Each structure stands twice: as C-alpha cells, then as structure tokens.
Amino acid sequence: MSERENILGRIREALKVSAPLPGTHGEPVATHTVAESPTSHAREWLPLVGPSVEAQFDLFARNCADLKAGFQLLANRDELKATLAKIATAEKWSRIASHDGELSHFASQSLGLPVLLTDKGYDVQALEKCDAAITECDALIAQTGGVVVTSRSTGGRALTILPPHHVVVARREQLVADLPAAFALLQKKYAPDYPSMISFITGPSRTGDIERILVLGAHGPKKLTILCF
C-alpha cells in the first residue's frame, strides 16, 4: 500500500465516526433534550454581561474601544445625519457605497454624495474606489463589541470588505447581550434558509503576522465606525 492510499484509508475510517455537536464535549447527542441544547450551558463559560440595557451599552462601548472601533450612541436620526456629515467632511469622502435598506438608504442619501448600491449588479472596480461603505446589520453584541452581518442584511459580501471605512448604522433595539442571544436571533430570523454569508465583525481588519506588530486594514476596512440611535 502506498503512502497516499494509507492516508486516504485513514481519512475514510475517520469519516465513519460522527463529530460531536459544538458544546457537547464528546457527550452522546441523545443526552441533550430540546430544552437543553448543546449551547444551553454556553453562558457558564462566556464572559458575564450586565442585566440592564445601560450596562450592556457600556460594555459594548468598552469592547469597541479595545478593538479600535469607533462607537457613538446617538439620540435620533438628526444626530445620525449630522455625525455622518462630520465624518464625511473630515475624511473628504467623494463617493460612498451602500445597499437598499431603510436605515442605510436614509444615511447614505443624507450626505448628498454619489452612492453605489451593491444589491444588484455593480462594478467591483467602482466599489474599490468608494471612500466608505454604509451598511445596516443584524445585531450588535455587548459581550464582544462585535457586529453581526449577513449577505442579506448588508447588500452582499463585498460591501463590508472592500471600502477602507465601514460605517454601520444600527438601532438601539438591535443590541443583544451575548453570543448565544446573537445565534438565537439569527436562527429566529433566517432558519432554515440561512444566508450564504454570516459574519461577526470585531473591529477593523487587522493582522499581527509580521513580527507580531498589529497592522490595521491588511485584509479589509482600516476603520470601523458604529453609529447607533
């Protein structure tokens, strides 16, 4: 038997054994009832989150700061409009990209700049030339400072990746406490027909591969700004 056949044989043998569900730690699946799913005990080992909305927004803000993401909690749409205009002026935006959502439409149109929509066909090179992307999201996670996006909620896959500045516009009620709550939200919203892309964004793109020096914007947006009202 050749080495190749030996390796393939071991792979075939391994595939006969079903992998445990996440969170079961190898326990038989039968021991988990519907009421006690494999994720039921997740909160026992995840970081604690405060019970009040105020505490959760405070935790989210602190996590964003640690992740080098900008976060502003605004009072209303007028503040959202003014804040976006201030950012656009400071960074000298000349064109932006967005998608056809109710909140993203309001935000992008308020700037009076050329807008590239990515919901349908678009020129990738035109998207690369945009100064920023304005998108909605599925949720904000207090526990991690992360933003949950999908290919359906943000106008496809490329919009949150190519432009150098990703601006997320969100509503206060989109904040969830922790990761189990985020997964439950996605299941309720999309199951069984899940989007082709689900992403948990935690800060701007970064890498520390070279001499462990943190570099932002290596594989995606260099800046992430979250505006919530």
Image (cartoon, rainbow, N blue to C red):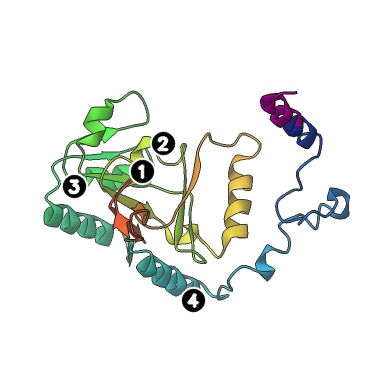
Residue type beneath disc 4 = Ala
Relative image position of residue 57 (x, y in whole percent): 44, 70
Instruction: Give the Cα distance between marks 4 and 2.
Output: 32 Å
Classed neighbour count for the residue bearing mark 1: other residues with Cα under 10 Å, few (<14), some (14–19), many (≥20): many
Camera-side residue: 29 or 146? 29
Residue 224 seen in render: no
Relative image position of residue 188 (x, y in whole percent): 63, 47
Residue of label 1: 160
Residue of label 2: 157
Marked residue nearer the N-terminal end (1 or 4): 4
Relative image position of residue 99 (x, y in whole percent): 34, 37
Camera-side residue: 209 or 29? 209
Q: Is residue 16 left or right of residue 180?
A: right
Marked residue nearer the N-terminal end (1 or 3): 3
Which callout, 1 or 4, points to the residue nearer the camera? 1
Q: Secondary structure at mark 4?
A: helix
| Labelled pair 1, 4 in contact (Cβ < 8 Å) | no
Instruction: Give the Cα distance between marks 3 and 2.
Output: 23 Å
Q: Is residue 210 above or below residue 4?
A: below
Residue of label 3: 111
User: In the rendering, which numbered label is found on residue 55?
Assistant: 4
Marked residue nearer the N-terminal end (3 or 2): 3
Relative image position of residue 170 (x, y in whole percent): 40, 55
Classed neighbour count for the residue bearing mark 3: other residues with Cα under 10 Å, few (<14), some (14–19), many (≥20): many
Which callout, 3 or 4, points to the residue nearer the camera? 4
| Labelled pair 1, 3 in contact (Cβ < 8 Å) | no
Classed neighbour count for the residue bearing mark 2: other residues with Cα under 10 Å, few (<14), some (14–19), many (≥20): some
Give the magenta-colored segment's residue range.
Answer: 1-9
Instruction: Give the Cα distance between marks 2 and 1.
Output: 7 Å
Q: Magenta includes 214?
A: no
